[in-house]
Amino acid sequence: MEKASVFFKRIMLGILLALLGLTLCLAVREGLTARSYLLALVLGAGWAAGLYWLLRRYALPVPRHAALWAMGVCFIMNLAWVLAVRIEPFSDYQEYWDVARALANGTEIPDAWYVAMYPHILGTATILSALQRVFGESVFAVTVLNVVLTALSCGLVWLLAKELAGERAAFLAALLWAVTPCKLMLGSLVFSEPIYTFLILLFFLLFLRLEKLIEKEPLPALLLALALGLLLAAINLVRPIALILVIAAALWIVFLRGEKAKNARLWALWLAAFLVMTAVFRVSGSLWDRHVERLLGQEIASVPWYNIYVGFNETTGGTYAEEDMDLLTAYLKQGKSAPEAQESMIPHLKERLASGINFPKLFAVKLFSFLGADQLGGYTYRFTRSERFVKICMGVCNVFYYGVFLAAVAGIMRLFRSRALGAGLLLPLYFLGLTLAHMLVEVSDRYHYSLIPILIIFAALGFAGEERRTQ
């Protein structure tokens, strides 16, 4: 079983390395026409090589309470940014804010049809409405929440990296997350990414605890599985991607546990824990859905056929298209419910799939859109700041991202060569799962936000070269 698990691990990591390698090739190709990408890639490689050289020559000092130091740096830097650079909600971010305002004031939900199409809007808005009840309609209070969540995520990055690669790599990972420019710049927005990213990192950490607990204390382990089910439900309320984590957990339990997979008692315990986790997730999600439907006064959609339809729009490269949204809203104007409108997109999806799409080209465009750059932090300010400010911010974000990206490839290669197995492999499984999922649905660079801390953990492994275990 050990050989089989290592084999499956290397297949999974090999696919991930191939996707990351292809992404770098696409970035180079894009850089031949848009030179800013090529320049950012060269500068990113330069700072990554420089840091690697310094770490080989000088040992990174790890202070006592390293996690608290890194969290403090993260908090101060992000707070300074949101104090200096403020931005009013717009576009989708305005939707979150308006729904939160309605919830806080007990008034009718605006654009209820749109929320019924995307009920996770209400999940984020519910959290934001609690802030509004305490602090009033203060966008600044939301940005402070973003700062707190990114600082807490910094602590989780440290804990996860410590489990995977030791304290030296953990401190480096936490510092890299603390100074990540895109995360810092996006902190000024009213958006959901800091919330669900924190929850996902917490899920990884608790699953690692479950692996250690399940052999020795079955009853507490089942209680922890229950908590994980509630955490999955919370993630799904804010962003409907928890199913990817469920699939990742199932794949790890079945294929990646090594010699422990020979133990019949452990099989029974893992099956019980998985069933508890998924049952709580499903029941909690159903209860929330019923709450949302009562609040909106209409049925909510479950399968995002519209987003799948957009994902195969060859003209826009799988990104948002106004004409696709017009088609969806036309069905809603006919009096159809949100689920009926979504299902009405199925014939159009079949027609689009049969229209002769160049799938390799489409998937290459989507992969670059999803992972090829990290410039949204700067691009966000295009309506409120000068063009020069926006370009500088975009460039800084991309230079940092490419350096982390290249170091992460080195870290994953170290992991590939290692025979170590453990629940830490959920991180690359989730990374791969989210990437492949967005090859099928609508894509945007914003959607890779929750992958950045995972890239950083792998980058720290590549820089520090200290991979000890994956659990």
Image: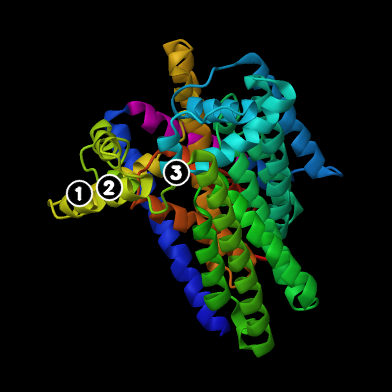
Residue 266 is labelled as none
Mark 1 closeness class: few <14, some 14–19, many ≥20 residues within 10 Å: some
Residue 144 in which image quadrant: top right
Q: Mark 2 is on which residue type?
A: Tyr
What residue is drawn where x is 54% and y is 39%?
122
* Distance of label 1 from label 2 (alpha carbons): 7 Å
Whole-percent x, y for residue 42 in the image? 43, 34
Question: Is 67 left or right of 460, judged from the image as shown?
Answer: right
Tag 2 near tag 3, CB within 8 Å? no
User: Looking at the image, is mark 1 or mark 2 earlier in the sequence?
Assistant: 2
Residue receiving disc 3 = 298
**Circle 1: residue type:** His
Image-based side of 397 in relation to 128, left or right: left
Residue at (68% x, 80% y) in the render: 269
Q: Residue 350 in the image: x percent, y percent?
A: 19, 55
Kind of element beneath mark 3: loop
Q: Is residue 164 visible?
A: no
**Crowdedness near tag 2: few (<14), some (14–19) or many (≥20) residues, C-alpha within 10 Å:** many
Q: Residue at position x 66%, y 73% from top? A: 273
State the residue position of label 1. 348
Which range of residues does the magenta coloring cover?
A: 35-51
Question: Do tag 1 and tag 2 residues touch (Cβ < 8 Å)?
Answer: yes
Instruction: Describe the element under mark 2 as helix, strand or loop.
Output: helix
Is residue 191 located in the magenta-colored stretch of the structure? Answer: no
Q: Which mark is residue 309?
A: 2
Check the image and report above or below for 211 versus 445. Answer: below
Predominant SS of the magenta segment:
helix
Q: Is residue 284 left or right of residue 321?
A: right
Q: Where 50 falls versus 137 (above or below)?
A: below
